[in-house]
Image (cartoon, helix red, strand yellow):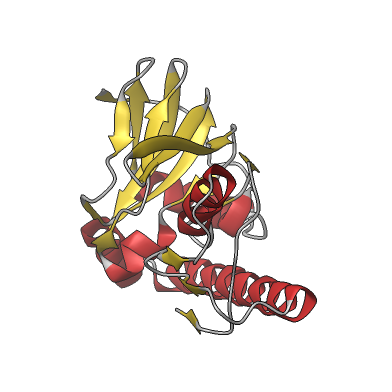
Amino acid sequence: MQTVSYDVVLPPTGIIQNLPEDVRAALTHAGQFIEMGPKETLIKEGSAQENLYILITGQLEVTSIVTGKKVQLGKIESGGCFGEMGMLCQSVASASVSATDISVVWSMNVSQFDAFLTNSTFEAACMLVEIARTLAHRLQQANEAVRAKNVVQASLSCRTGTGHSSDKNEQDDADAGVSKYFGIFSGTQKKTGKSKISTDIKL
């Protein structure tokens, strides 16, 4: 895994899909590009996480350890955005992200974002508005799922991704893993299983 030069403006995808090209160009230069080989790990579950990522090329796999077993939560395709909550909250990663192929990601850490906010206030404000819209949309989806399924016993934190359930079979193990996945990633990804969500939604 190494930092590389990559002559491209970030595409309009995920949390930056509504940003004009000049704002995306400024954002591009505020971060850096990282090239990964197959099976290299970008984010390790349980480690400190303070970076926003956008997958430029390649494919990433999202996994988590659930009741002692490695569970695949999904895959992130080119254009997928993830890690914005880590950048804003400097939280602990609730899933691991690894490359399945040679991949290039764009990354911005909290220090770089602070500098971007100081030096490019308007552009940073546009980005923060998009992040707020994304989080509001996720909360709306969670509330709709609560009403549709009438789930009252499980609990989920959209920030930490912690799910609890009384069921013990293998499908519920996968469901618990997907609960970790919920609210962490945005953009283009594929999920497996169904998350169990309650009225206890915390950002």
Residue 17 figure quarter: bottom right
Q: Is residue 117 left or right of residue 105?
A: left
x 37%, y 37%: residue = 69
x 44%, y 52%: residue = 27
Judge whether 138 appears above or below 62 on screen. Answer: below
Q: Is residue 49 left or right of residue 163?
A: left
Judge whether 201 appears above or below 156 on screen. Answer: below
Instruction: Please identify the residue farthest to the right as the structure is shown.
Output: 148
Q: Is residue 171 left or right of residue 145?
A: left
Quarter occupied by the C terminus: bottom left
**Front one among 136 and 172:** 172
Q: Is residue 27 left or right of residue 118?
A: right
In the rendering, at what x and y percent does residue 195 appear? 60, 59
x 31%, y 53%: residue = 93
Residue 41 figure quarter: top left
In the rendering, at what x and y percent does residue 148 appear? 79, 75
